[in-house]
Amino acid sequence: DALPISGIQGIEALQVRAAMATGAAAIRMAYLALKSGEVRTVAITGLERMSSGDPTPIMARALDAETEIPAGQTMVSINAHIMEKYLMTYNAEYEQFANFAVNAHRNALSNPDALLHKQVNVADVLKAREIVTPIRLYDCAPICDGSASIVLTNDATLARKQNGIQLLASETVCDSLAVAARAQPLELNAARQSAQKAYRRAGIEPTDVDFFELHDAFSIMACLALEACGFAEPGAGWKLAAEGDIFLEGKIPIATFGGLKARGHPIGATGIYQAIEIYRQLRGQAGMNQISNARCAMMQSIGGAGTTLITNIFRAL
């Protein structure tokens, strides 16, 4: 139905679904189509309406139907189990994760597209109501409605004329659907492998990435993604938050417009929002959220609880 509404007819149209990674998956499909030479320009629209009905059972469809769903697991409880195991394994403290939420909310304040314009501090995070131990309210990204569109093209002249950026790499890797079936559930192996493939494809190292738009649906996932992608050693991702290295002026800024946590998480459109935020940063259009001298950016989207990982790397032209 979207094509007639947009005024576009007589062309190929595809629908892409990859749970929470849908937007990033659509970018990868467009990337592959462009690389094949079959198409020259692709328009991508991500959209989601989650404001009617309970999103919990819908989100649970991204979990394992044989073991996790029959046991009453939800996306929140699965992430809570992962975080609890992380805290015990690495002798970490819950309060060391608080800056993930503080940073996201701070960056969302100057983003007119953000869902939440509310500044929070560490004390707010620590006293927020508990959802599933040890996860509290500010560890969770709000599910919301949203829509966003981008255009990818092989036409270099058009790209320069429209002040484009370059998509250097788009890689995806899958892991076991059930978290318990993974040998190392704290390592987000699919995130690590997709990032490594993307680094090789782009010809860069983690140190070349100026900022990282990660999938911070939960604070623990932000921490694990930083570790998996080579920005911190296993068990030390929280230090980047606790020491302020994830802030706009830090070593590896994340959630520069609020991330999923404060900009909001409109499932099917989230990855497109991330790409647009990267565009604004690399084009110097981020206003108060601008990263100084930003030239290379990475985004990563997660489908399920680390089941499908898609990594995209961009650079300024």
Image: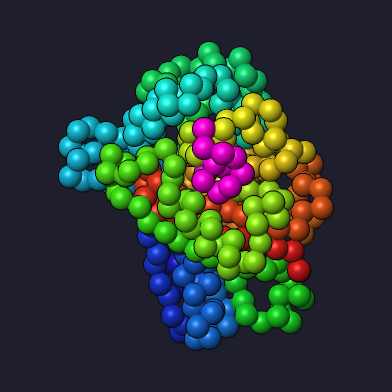
Name which residue lies at 59% across and 17% down: 124
Q: Can residue 53 be seen in this view?
A: no
- x then y, percent, for residue 210: 72, 51
Left/right placement of residue 287 relative to residue 9 reads: right
164 w.r.t. 217: above or below:
below
Furthest residue in direction right, as rendered: 293
- x then y, percent, for residue 174: 37, 56
Q: Which quadrant is home to the C terminus?
A: bottom right
Extent of the magenta region: 225-235
- As rendered, which of 299 and 236 lies closer to the eye? 236
User: Can you tell which quarter of the image residue 314 is in?
Assistant: bottom right
Magenta-drawn stretch, dominant element (helix, strand or loop)? loop
Magenta stretch holds residue 58: no
Left/right placement of residue 118 relative to residue 48 reads: right
Q: Which quadrant is home to the N terminus?
A: bottom left
- x then y, percent, for residue 132: 37, 23
Left/right placement of residue 36 relative to residue 154 reads: left
Q: Can residue 65 be seen in this view?
A: yes
Name which residue lies at 27% across and 33% down: 73
